Image (cartoon, rainbow, N blue to C red):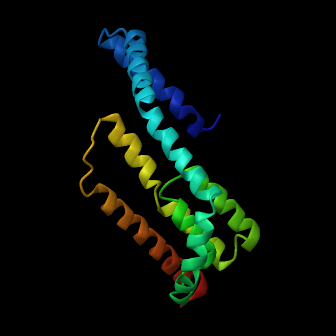
Amino acid sequence: MTAAAAVIPLIIVIIIAHGLYKKVDVFSEFAEGAKENLKTCAELLPTLIALITAVGLFRASGAQELITDFLSGFFDRIGFPAECLPLALIRPVSGSGALAVYESLLEENGPDSFAGRVASVMLGSTETTFYTLAVYYGAVRIKNTRHTLAASLAGDMTGFIVSVLTVNIFFEQI
C-alpha cells in the first residue's frame, strides 16, 4: 500500500479517535450530517436537473453549432482555434458536456495539435461556473448573486485567452 492510499483511512481514524477523546457520539453526528446533506441534495436537485436539461437542449438544438460557425472566423483571426470554441461555450455550464466536447476534439485533432493543447489547458484552468454557482448558492439559499456571475465569466474568459497564450509560449515559441 502506498502512502497516498493510506491517507484517507488515516484521516478517518484520526477523526474517530478525536471524537472518542472528546466523548462525542461519532456515529450519531455522522448520521445527522448525512441527513442534513440529503436534505441539501434534495433542494439542489431541481436546479441541477434544469441545468442538465438546458445543456442537452443547447447541444441537441444545433445552437452550439450555429454560434460556433458564426464566431469561428473572428476567433481564427485573433489566434483562438475555432475547434476549441464549442469547449469554451459549454465549459462554464457543464463539466460532463465539456469532457465530451474535449474528447471529440482530441479524436478529431489529436492531443499534440495546437487545438488539442489549448483545449487541454482550457479544461484544466477553467470552472463550470453555472454549475458551481447553482450548487454553492443553492446550498446556502442565496438568491441575489450580485457580481459573482460576471466576475466568474470574466475569469473563464481570462482562462480561455491565457490558455492560447500559454500554449503559444511553451509549444509554438512566439
Please state if 112 lies on the left or on the right of 44 as rendered: right
Q: Quadrant of residue 42?
A: top left
Determine if residue 118 is in view. Answer: no
Q: Observer-nearest residue: 102 or 46?
A: 46
Task: Say if 119 sits above or below 77 in the image.
Answer: above
Residue at 52% in and 59% down: 91
Q: Observer-nearest residue: 168 or 88?
A: 88
Task: Say if 164 sits above or below 99 in the image.
Answer: below
Q: Residue furthest front?
A: 61
Residue at 63% in and 74% down: 83
Determine if residue 161 is in view. Answer: yes
Q: Observer-nearest residue: 132 or 111?
A: 132
Task: Say if 8 sits above or below 18 in the image.
Answer: below
Q: Position of residue 13 (x, y in %)?
A: 47, 21
Task: Say if 145 sits above or below 6 in the image.
Answer: below
Q: Position of residue 148 (x, y in %)?
A: 29, 55
Number of numbered discs? 0
Quadrant placement of the N terminus:
top right
Q: Position of residue 166 (x, y in %)?
A: 50, 77
Residue at 49% in and 54% down: 93
Residue at 75% in and 66% down: 107
Q: Quadrant of residue 38?
A: top left
Q: Position of residue 135 (x, y in %)?
A: 40, 41
Q: Quadrant of residue 63?
A: bottom right
